[in-house]
Image (tube, rainbow, N blue to C red):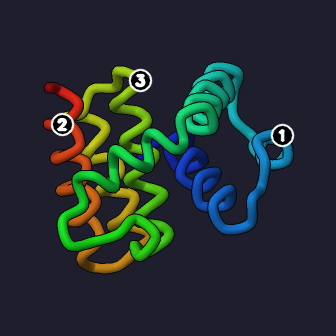
């Protein structure tokens, strides 16, 4: 998983848990110019579309509520959904966030994160 995606998940996680803002978060990030631009674009998209992205993801969760998911899994799913909505290649995006879950979350998290993002991709395609 690339560093921009890791930082994007971290931003969503921190923003959700402690309401950390974009500027405060970016002061701690060290990325090259292109990486920083991509991260800012992702963060801006998330902040501008947070409610609609959360609602779209919530609509595909069968038997789950977004607020009941593990925080890291939720952040990875929301980050992946944002990337897909911004035109990222789902065949690259989905496994990447599954890898994140494999490294940082629970044993069952990778398949759950990828399953939700695959369902999200199908809903977005319509």
Question: Rounded to the nearest whole Å, what is the CA distance between mark 3 and mark 2?
Answer: 15 Å
Q: How crowded is mark 2: few (under 14 residues within 10 Å), some or many (20 or more)?
A: few
Residue ranking furthest to the bottom: 107
**Residue drawn at the location 38% of the way across and 53% of the way down:** 77
Q: Nearer the viewer, residue 6 or 118?
A: 118
Residue 68 percent location from the top left of the image: 41, 76
Labels 3 and 1: the sequence-earlier one: 1
Labels 3 and 2: the sequence-earlier one: 3
Label placed on residue 23:
1
Q: Nearer the viewer, residue 99 or 52?
A: 52
Looking at the rendered structure, the secondary structure element under dot 3 is: loop
Labels 1 and 2: the sequence-earlier one: 1
Q: Splitting the image into 4 quarters, where does residue 15 fall?
A: bottom right
Q: Mark 3 points at which residue?
A: 86
Q: Is residue 94 above or below residue 113?
A: above
Label placed on residue 114:
none
Q: How crowded is mark 1: few (under 14 residues within 10 Å), some or many (20 or more)?
A: few
Q: Nearer the viewer, residue 96 or 83?
A: 83
**Residue drawn at the location 26% of the way across and 35% of the way down:** 92
Residue 44 percent location from the top left of the image: 64, 30
Q: Name the residue under label 2.
A: 123
Residue 67 percent location from the top left of the image: 46, 70
């Amino acid at each position: 998983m690339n560093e921009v995606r890791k930082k994007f998940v971290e931003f969503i996680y921190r923003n959700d848990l402690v309401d950390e803002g974009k500027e405060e978060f970016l002061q701690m990030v060290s990325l090259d110019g292109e990486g920083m631009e991509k991260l800012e674009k992702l963060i801006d998209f998330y902040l501008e579309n947070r409610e609609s992205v959360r609602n779209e993801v919530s609509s595909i969760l069968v038997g789950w509520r977004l607020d009941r998911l593990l925080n890291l899994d939720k952040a990875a799913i929301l980050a992946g959904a944002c990337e897909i909505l911004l035109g990222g290649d789902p065949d690259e995006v989905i496994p990447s966030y599954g890898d994140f879950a494999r490294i940082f979350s629970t044993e069952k998290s990778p398949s759950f994160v990828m399953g939700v993002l695959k369902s999200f991709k199908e809903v977005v395609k319509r």
